Image (cartoon, rainbow, N blue to C red):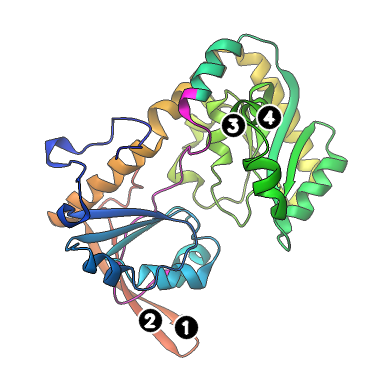
Amino acid sequence: MRDFDTDDWTLSNRARMAESIADTDILILNTGGEDFTDLRGFLSRQGFKGIICLWLHDNHVAHNANYQTVLEADVYFCSHHGAQHENYLLNPVSLSAPVLPACYHNLPLDTVCSLMTRYADLPRLSRVVAPYFLYKDFKRTALLETLRCESPELVAFFTDESDRKEKYYDAITDAEKASRWLFFKSSIVVPLHEDLSIRLFDGLIWGHTVLVPDTLPAFDHVFDADEAARLGIVRYDAAQGAAGVSKAAREAISLFDRDGQEGLWHRHRHVMGNHLLGHRMKALLSFLSDFAQGRTVNDIVGIRISDGIRLGMRSHRPDGRPLL
C-alpha cells in the first residue's frame, strides 16, 4: 500500500511496491523508540528473505529500545545527527548509514493544501505559535512554560503528555488542529533533545517564518545559510532563554511582513517539493543503490563503552555530502 505523500519517490523502474512480505527485497521500517527484538525471526517465519532497513525518527531518545531494534536490521538511518544521538547505536551486526533527516509528517496533505488555498490570503496574527506536548522530566517542558510567561510574542497550545490521546488526538478534528498553525505568521522549534524536530517543517508548510535554536547539529544537513535566509528561518540564542526567543520572534514576524504572500507560498512549496516522506524514501533508496554498487566509503569504527570498545561499520558518500 502506498502512503508516501508524493509519487516522486521511485528509483527508476527497478523499484516497486511488493504485494507480499515474501516478495519484498528491501523492507523499510520507520521506527520511533520501539523495541523490536526478534523482528528478524518474525519476518523470516513470514517468508521474508530480504534486507531489513530502519529509519529511526526518535534516535535522540529511548536509547535501549533503539539499540535492541538496530541489532535486528541490516542497515539503519538516523533522523537526528550528533555523537550523542548516533554513537550508542553502533554495533557489529548492522550498517550505520548517513543521517536521513526528519520531514513533514503531521496532518494530511489534502487538509493542508485545501486550507492554505482557501485561507492563505486572510490576515494573520503577528504572533509566534507553539503547539507542543509537555513531556514530564524534560528540560523542554520547563522552557516552554517559561516562554509562555515571559515571551509576549508567543501563543501556546500545550497538551500534557498524559492527555495526548484524550485531549488532542481524539478530541479535536484535523481542521481544528490545523487552525493552531494556519492563522499565525510564525512558529517556533523547541527541541526535546537537540533534535531536528518536524515542527520545523510544520511551520514552513503553513507559510510561517520559523524560529530555530542555534544548537541543532542536524540543521546543516537540511538547510544551508542562504536557503535558510530565503525561507525566513531565524536562529535564536538558546542560552538567552526567553530574551533570545523574543528577539528572534520580532525578527521573524518582521520578515513575514516584508515577504508577504510571495514568501508564504515559497515556504509552503519548498516543503511540498523537498521535504515529504517520498523525498526521504528516494534519498534512502539512492544511497542503498550506491552502496550495492560500491560507490560509498565504508569504515570500521569503534566507540568506547563501559567494558571496552564496540566495533561497527559506518558508510558515507565519498564527498561526505548529506543525503539530501
Where does the C terminus fall, quadrant-wise?
top left
Which of labels 3 and 4 is toward the front?
4
- Above or below residue 203? Residue 18 is below
> Tag 4's secondary structure?
helix
* Residue 310 numbered mark, or none: 2
The magenta segment: 89-110
Amino acid on which disc 2 is placed: Arg
Q: Are marks 2 and 1 in contact (CB under 8 Å)?
A: yes
Which of labels 2 and 3 is toward the front?
3
Indicate the position of residue 278 as horizontal and vertical percent values: 34, 37
Marked residue nearer the N-terminal end (3 or 4): 4
- Residue sticking out furthest to the right: 149
Measured Cα–Cα span from mark 2 to mark 3: 40 Å
> Tag 1's secondary structure?
strand
Amino acid on which disc 1 is placed: Ile
* Residue 180 numbered mark, or none: 4
Which of labels 4 and 1 is toward the front?
4
Marked residue nearer the N-terminal end (2 or 1): 1
- Above or below residue 49? Residue 7 is above
Measured Cα–Cα span from mark 3 to mark 1: 39 Å
